[in-house]
Image (spheres, rainbow, N blue to C red):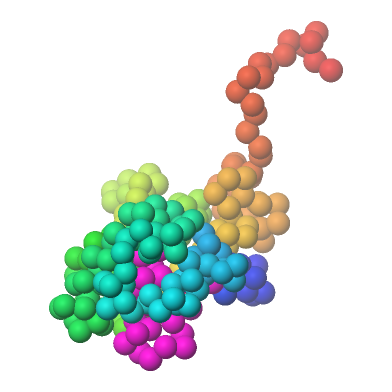
């Protein structure tokens, strides 16, 4: 189902950011791209319409010093319509200042260092460590990985059979059994699957070739009934 590579993540994922730049500049671009990706579709972040990262690149704003010299309002307009664009413009300024003053324009090379940056959570930190530094310290778990892992029954809360409540709980549960060599590929595998087949609403269970192994198959795939409809009596049915 993922062999065709036709999901948005396959061509517009965060790891594509700054692929043409020197290593140091590319690392910063990956960090910025990850920061913008939260609550934002890949095509909005990296689309050719152009996406937010393309607009930043065209204006030379994937560089810490350049971002410091640009006001928040300008940055916010440039990254719109990514989710929470005003807040992210503020984070970009703060991150750029830290990276410029403490790391010479580069980014932290440790998980804790990345997590200390404004707006950066576990999902982003693990992604950046993997893509920017080629250092795999954990699974990058976003909403797709979190949702699908629970639908497939791959994860649970410690000591229970209940679903995990947060992506971070899912990450810990997955890492308890998934071989480390699968920690990197599981993210694009499930993200693309979630974008094309196992969607958040009305997943396409009928076309899913693993539905016979999925305990959630066909349980969320039907359209919800309008709340205004009432159950008809036998004499009222058409």
Q: Quadrant of the N terminus?
A: bottom right
Judging depth in this view, the residue of 109 and 192 nearest the camera is 109
Residue 69, by quadrant, is: bottom left
Q: Quadrant of the C terminus?
A: top right
Along the horizontal axis of the image, is 152 left or right of 49?
Answer: left
Judging depth in this view, the residue of 172 and 32 nearest the camera is 32
Along the horizontal axis of the image, is 144 left or right of 94?
Answer: right
Residue 159 seen from this side: yes
Instruction: Where is residue 39? Give x, y as percent.
Output: 43, 54
What main secondary structure does the magenta stretch of the protein show?
A: helix
Instruction: Where is residue 149? Give x, y as percent.
Output: 46, 57
Q: Residue at x 62, y 60 (%)?
A: 196
Q: Which residues are magenta?
A: 12-38
Instruction: Where is residue 166? Give x, y as percent.
Output: 35, 50
Whether the magenta-drawn stretch holds residue 120 is answered as: no
> Against 118, is 214 above or below?
above
Extreme-left residue of the structure? 102
Q: Residue at x 38, y 64 (%)?
A: 75
Instruction: Where is residue 217? Give x, y as percent.
Output: 60, 48
Extreme-top residue of the structure? 235
Along the horizontal axis of the image, is 16 left or right of 133?
Answer: right
Q: Residue at x 38, y 44 (%)?
A: 162
Whether the magenta-drawn stretch holds residue 27 is answered as: yes
Residue 123 seen from this side: no
Extreme-bottom residue of the structure? 22
Along the horizontal axis of the image, is 148 left or right of 24?
Answer: right
> Against 161, is 94 above or below?
below
Q: Residue at x 28, y 51 (%)?
A: 158
Total marks in image: 0
Judging depth in this view, the residue of 228 and 230 nearest the camera is 228
């Amino acid at each position: 189902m993922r062999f065709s590579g036709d999901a948005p993540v396959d061509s517009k994922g965060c790891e594509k950011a700054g692929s043409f730049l020197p290593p140091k500049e590319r690392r910063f671009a990956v960090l910025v791209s990850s920061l913008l990706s939260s609550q934002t579709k890949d095509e909005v972040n990296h689309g050719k319409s152009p996406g937010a990262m393309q607009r930043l690149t065209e204006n030379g704003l994937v560089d810490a010093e350049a971002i410091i010299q640009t006001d928040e309002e300008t940055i916010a307009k440039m990254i719109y319509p990514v989710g929470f664009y005003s807040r992210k413009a503020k984070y970009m300024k703060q991150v750029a200042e830290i990276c410029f003053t403490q790391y010479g324009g580069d980014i932290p090379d440790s998980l804790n260092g990345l997590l200390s940056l404004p707006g950066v959570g576990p999902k982003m930190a693990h992604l950046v460590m993997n893509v920017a530094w080629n250092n795999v310290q954990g699974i990058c778990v976003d909403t797709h990985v979190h949702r699908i892992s629970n639908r497939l029954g791959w994860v649970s809360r410690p000591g229970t059979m209940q679903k995990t409540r947060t992506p971070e709980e899912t990450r810990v549960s997955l890492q308890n059994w998934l071989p480390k060599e699968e920690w990197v590929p599981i993210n694009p595998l499930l993200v693309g699957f979630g974008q094309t087949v196992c969607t958040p609403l009305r997943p396409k269970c009928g076309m899913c070739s693993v539905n016979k192994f999925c305990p959630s198959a066909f349980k969320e795939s039907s359209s919800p009934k309008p709340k205004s409809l009432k159950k008809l009596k036998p004499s009222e049915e058409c």
